Amino acid sequence: MKKAFTLTELLMVVLVLGVLATVSVPKMKQVLETRRTTEAENMMGAIRSEQEKRCVSNKSYSQKWSSVQNVAPKQETSSYKYTLTPTGVIASGSAYSLQMPSYADGRICCSGAGCNSLNKSYPLCNSEFSASLSVAAECEATDAEEEADEPICENQPDNLTEVVPCGCKNGGTKTNIYDTNTCSWVEGICDISDDCACSGTTPGETQACEPSAFPGQACGIQQALYDCDPTTGEYVFASWHDTCTVTDACQVESGDCCASDFEGDFLSCIANKYGTSSAEYKCSSGQSSACFSALGIYTGTNGSTPNYSAEGQAFVNGGYKNYACSQTVPCMTDMPSDSSSCNGCGTRSAVYECINGKWEWTSVGECSKTAEECGKCSNVGSSWSCPEEDNCSVTEYTCTCSDGSSYSDIGTGSTTAAEFGSIAKTKGSRTLKDGAECYYGQQKTENGKSYYCNSSTCKWQQTSTGGGGGGRPDMAQAGGKDYSKLSEALALAETLVAEQKK
């Protein structure tokens, strides 16, 4: 019976294979890369020999691939695409290009970001390398020769290669090649990366820590964090550090900022105590707009300015800077003058109190007229004495409210006091004035004679003609029988008429 492999044995095999792969794969890549660069060197060397033969035979170098096809059958292989230039040859790969700028010189340089990964060390194709080359100018390919050998592309440039800036801030170079087969430029590979690297130290910007973000820590600073912008190579702000660092200044700025004996920096103390986003700090630092906004103070719109009270004007003119110490905001306008009628003929004003910068209604004031002065009832069921006078006497009345309504205060200042109805009077006693014998309307009979009360003199007066007067004492001349007193009665009548006209 066959025995199976254990799990440990299988793991050991996998481990060995992994080690072999780790060692062999990089070696294999190096071998393959070496073969590719060797191919390019051999191909460009063969092309150079063929072009130098032409030069010795008093012919110019050729940019026509058919002229070197006997030594280089394929212009494009799996590794490179070859291009003939007026003085040399270029092998363009995926990440770099190998160039022989001068057949006469024969040296090879490398252009592109992949040059650093090659096994062989090639000089970079830059202006310094170009200046060191020796060139056989008399053998350089000419347009005339090219026109004779093969048609030239429409708008074909005179120089089929161009070195242009590239990479981060155009600090590098790349060589572009004009392909006469496709009549288009083939872009070369830049010798530096397109991404820029930031140099130097990051900016050291800081800000005061917000107490709301760091509970229990009223003082400290936050460090700014930066990222490198690869397009510019400059540091850009990213965020604030999530920790608050306590500084030496935190130990100095302690105690009561508003105390008369405080010796530290007042503004720093307020910032440490309340934070830089607080109303206290904004007001103390003179940020008037931010201060008023934080305190909810209206400052007008579209250029208009509110009608401030004297206290409000003083506050906006600079008094707000002391808010951190006073913790008081005055009412910016004068107290409202709401009033309403009361008791039928009086007025009363609403009473306001300034609370946190706003007028708050608290109560109503006393009525300027009493209910009695207005002839109105102040409360249901109330009563008072209403004297009524005539020439001879004073009559007392008991007055009560005949309306069942109750009185309502003005409340919020917009409710008008209720009006009340008429007054019911109940007649009471009648009292003669000093020196009066009788009052208007009284009459009597004494010793068989009739008397009435003279309302002018408040004295008893006998009827003149002995008549009963028909129930009206002041006109007691009707029915008289004593004709000897007629003249006296007429004189009395004139007196009474005169009194009635008064």
Image (tube, helix red, strand yellow):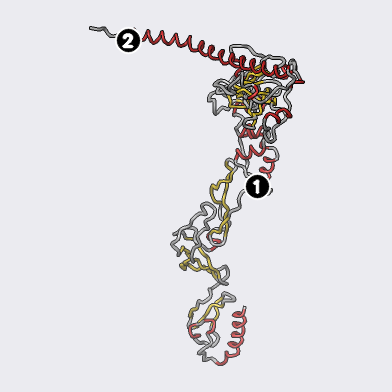
Whole-percent x and y of residue 278? 60, 32
**Residue placed farthest to the right in the image?**
138
The reply to whether the C-beta atoms of the residues labelled 1 and 2 are less than 8 Å apart is no
| Pick the front one: 456 or 349 | 349
Residue 451's x, y, as percent? 52, 80
Viewer-proximal residue, 290 or 257?
A: 290
Residue beneath the point at 48% across and 83% down: 471
Q: Is residue 338 above or below residue 467?
A: above
Residue 219: in sight, yes or no? no
Q: Nearer the viewer, mark 1 or mark 2?
A: 2
Secondary-structure class at tag 2? helix
Helix, strand or loop at label 1? It is loop
Q: Is residue 384 left or right of residue 141?
A: left
The residue type indicated by label 1 comes to Gly
Q: Check disc 1 and report the residue beneath it.
A: 300
Q: How many numbered circles does the render carry? A: 2
**Residue 377 as seen in the image, left or right of residue 94:** left
User: How many C-alpha atoms fall within 10 Å of the one at disc 1: few (<14), some, or many (≥20)?
Assistant: few
Q: Which quadrant of the view contains residue 482?
A: bottom right
